[in-house]
């Protein structure tokens, strides 16, 4: 039987380039499909900021020229096979130069309209015809739109199915209609309220949400939340209207990469058998590295995060003095993002040098050390489509303290002191004192009921957050689309 061919189109992907969880998903999920039945490949921009180590290994496939935004543009196609997955890279120095994948919002509209269109233009040239195009977030939202537009003139594209995954509904790729029209080259036909227009603006994500055959998002709870005005980011009506095509499939993590048993970035690798002992060694090593008081019994709270409004740091700001006045507590934070949060954490680190360490940069290695060395991991998000950091924390036995929203609600089971169940701690309302109360409670359990705490560490580490179960759900979705395609095709098309 012929394999079902799926192409992921994404703006970032590990190990090549990562600014957030989208890259983790686009880079790790393709490895987990049943390779006897599914051939899943990935296409992304060939940014000049991808490390040379990878750029040098990319193999030239071909190139073409195209007219886009009144310019004639070179587009190169490169490929690289890694861990059994084929990655394609679209090369355009005009669009993909610079030290970061993203730039000003308006430039990004043009950049990713270009990328979305070129994904389709490149397909007939790579000797591989996908059955399904699986797009991710607003940057590839126009793929289903362009597919419906000029590409329908080419038989190659007939009956190609599309899926769009929402990793974060907050980012939609929005600009005024005349600009979006000019930059995308789409005709006025597409700029009506039933298509790309939303609130008098052009909206690239909305295009994908209207035109894709299926919509997925990264947890069951977020799939429900985005149908409500609070979480719907202005598109809750559309999400309700398309609810029959919308499904939540929770993210997993690459459990071979995030593996405390053979992690070269941590001081003392460990498994379930020696976690309690070795986590202490890791804690002491991190305290030493960061200049905190070396104390194996201090209650160390960690954060690894983009520093944005989404992540709930205004709650932390509100009660940081109270958190820091709890006896024997330490707070380690690794992150970059909005200046006000970066400075806020720098400020608290200067105020409490012996108990707060603010690492304001991006480091994969340091993130692993924090997951491995902390006792608890704080994620008080305002909203969280899925969240991967809490899964990594669980895998390393750092118990998550989370707000009950999106994927945080679906993946962290709150501690129950009566039934002795749970893998972390949670609070419901977006309220700083509720968060403070649950941090204080978690610390109390750590100090006064260590047996329950230790049991919970082991339970957390035993949770299965590999991609296996979720990959099967994506496969079922692809199967469904293939059945639809069979029904739609006329005998002459097959
Ligand atoms: P989001 O995608 O919204 O940022 P996720 O929890 O899904 O949130 O994914 C965040 C990913 O980025 C995790 O892999 C986390 O470890 C990583 N990360 C975030 N900030 C940093 C940082 N400063 N250094 C290293 N890794 C980071
Ligand atoms: C987004 C979300 C995050 C999710 C990630 C991967 O960045 O903010 O919750 O885990 O995408 O799907």
Image (tube, helix red, strand yellow):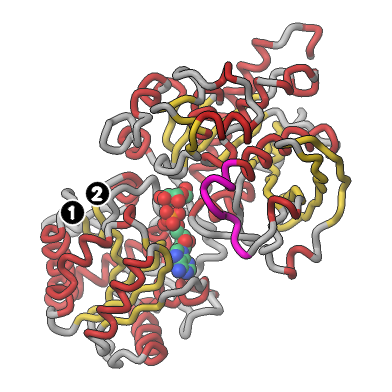
Please report the residue visible at 64 percent of the width from the left and 41 percent of the height from the top.
8
Please report the residue visible at 52 percent of the width from the left and 39 percent of the height from the top.
138
Say which mark, if any, is on residue 489: none
Q: Dot 1 surroundings within 10 Å: few (below 14), some, or many (20 or more)? A: many
Say which mark, if any, is on residue 427: 1
Q: Counting residues from the N terminus, which is met first, the one under dot 1 or under dot 2? A: 2
Segment colored magenta: 99-109
Q: How far across and down, in percent of the image, does residue 336 sit?
A: 43, 67
Residue 100 painted magenta = yes
Please report contact status of discs 1 and 2: CB closer than 8 Å, yes or no. yes
Q: Is residue 363 above or below residue 409?
A: below
Separation (CA) of disc 1 from disc 2: 6 Å
Q: How far across and down, in percent of the image, does residue 84 sit?
A: 72, 53
Q: Nearest the camera: 82 or 58?
A: 58
Q: How far across and down, in percent of the image, does residue 193 sit?
A: 44, 19
Asked whether mark 2 lies closer than 8 Å to ligand 2, one says: no
Q: Nearest the camera: 24 or 211?
A: 211
Q: Is residue 224 left or right of residue 165?
A: left
Residue 272 painted magenta = no
Q: According to the image, label 2 marks what residue?
A: 404
Q: How far across and down, in percent of the image, does residue 420 sit?
A: 18, 59
Q: Is residue 91 above or below residue 314?
A: above
Give SS at disc 2: loop
Taking the view exactly as shown, the residue that stands out farthest to the top is 491
Res 70 seen here: yes
Instruction: Quadrant for residue 103, please give it.
Output: bottom right
Q: Is residue 447 above or below residue 5?
A: below
Q: Is residue 290 above or below residue 482?
A: below
Res 273 seen here: no
Please report the residue visible at 56 percent of the width from the left and 20 percent of the height from the top.
190
């Amino acid at each position: 039987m012929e394999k079902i061919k799926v192409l992921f189109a994404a703006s970032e992907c590990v190990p090549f380039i990562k600014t957030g969880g989208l890259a983790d998903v686009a880079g790790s999920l393709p490895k987990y499909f049943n390779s006897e039945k599914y051939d899943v490949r990935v296409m992304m921009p060939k940014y000049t900021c991808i490390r040379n180590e990878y750029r040098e290994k990319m193999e030239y496939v071909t190139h073409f020229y195209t007219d886009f935004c009144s310019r004639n543009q070179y587009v190169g196609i490169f490929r690289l096979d890694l861990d059994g997955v084929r990655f394609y890279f679209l090369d355009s120095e005009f669009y993909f130069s610079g030290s970061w994948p993203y730039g000003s919002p308006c430039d990004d509209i043009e950049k990713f309209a270009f990328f979305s269109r070129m994904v389709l233009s490149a397909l007939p040239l790579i000797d591989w015809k996908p059955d399904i195009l699986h797009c991710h977030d607003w940057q590839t939202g126009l793929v289903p739109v362009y597919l419906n537009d000029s590409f329908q003139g080419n038989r190659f594209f007939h009956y190609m199915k599309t899926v769009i995954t929402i990793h974060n509904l907050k980012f939609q790729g929005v600009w005024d209609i005349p600009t979006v029209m000019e930059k995308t080259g789409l005709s006025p036909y597409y700029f009506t309220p039933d298509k790309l227009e939303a609130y008098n603006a052009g909206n690239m994500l909305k295009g994908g949400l209207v035109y894709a055959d299926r919509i997925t998002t990264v947890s069951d709870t977020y799939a429900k939340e985005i149908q409500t005005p609070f979480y719907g980011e202005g598109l809750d009506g559309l999400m309700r209207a398309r609810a029959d095509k919308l499904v939540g499939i929770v993210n997993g993590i690459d459990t071979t990469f995030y593996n405390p048993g053979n992690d070269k970035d941590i001081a003392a690798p460990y498994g379930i058998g020696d976690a309690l002992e070795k986590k202490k060694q890791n804690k002491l090593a991190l305290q030493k590295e960061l200049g905190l008081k070396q104390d194996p019994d201090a209650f160390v709270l960690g954060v690894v995060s983009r520093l944005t409004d989404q992540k709930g740091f205004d709650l932390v700001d509100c009660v940081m003095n109270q958190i820091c006045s709890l006896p024997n507590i330490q707070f380690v934070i690794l992150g970059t993002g909005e200046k006000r949060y970066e400075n806020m954490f720098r400020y608290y680190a200067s105020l409490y040098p012996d108990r707060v360490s603010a690492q304001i940069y991006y480091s994969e290695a340091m993130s692993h050390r924090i997951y491995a060395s902390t006792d608890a991991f704080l994620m008080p998000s305002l909203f969280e489509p899925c969240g991967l950091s809490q899964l990594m924390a669980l895998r390393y036995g750092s118990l998550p303290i989370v707000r009950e929203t999106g994927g945080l609600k679906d993946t962290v089971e709150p501690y129950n002191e009566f039934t002795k169940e749970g893998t972390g701690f949670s609070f419901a309302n977006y309220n700083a004192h509720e968060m403070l109360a649950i941090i204080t409670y978690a610390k109390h359990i750590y100090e006064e009921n260590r047996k329950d705490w230790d049991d919970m560490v082991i339970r957390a580490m035993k949770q299965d957050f590999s991609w296996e179960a979720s990959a099967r759900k994506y496969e079922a979705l692809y199967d469904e689309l293939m059945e639809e395609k069979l029904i739609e095709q006329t005998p002459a098309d097959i």
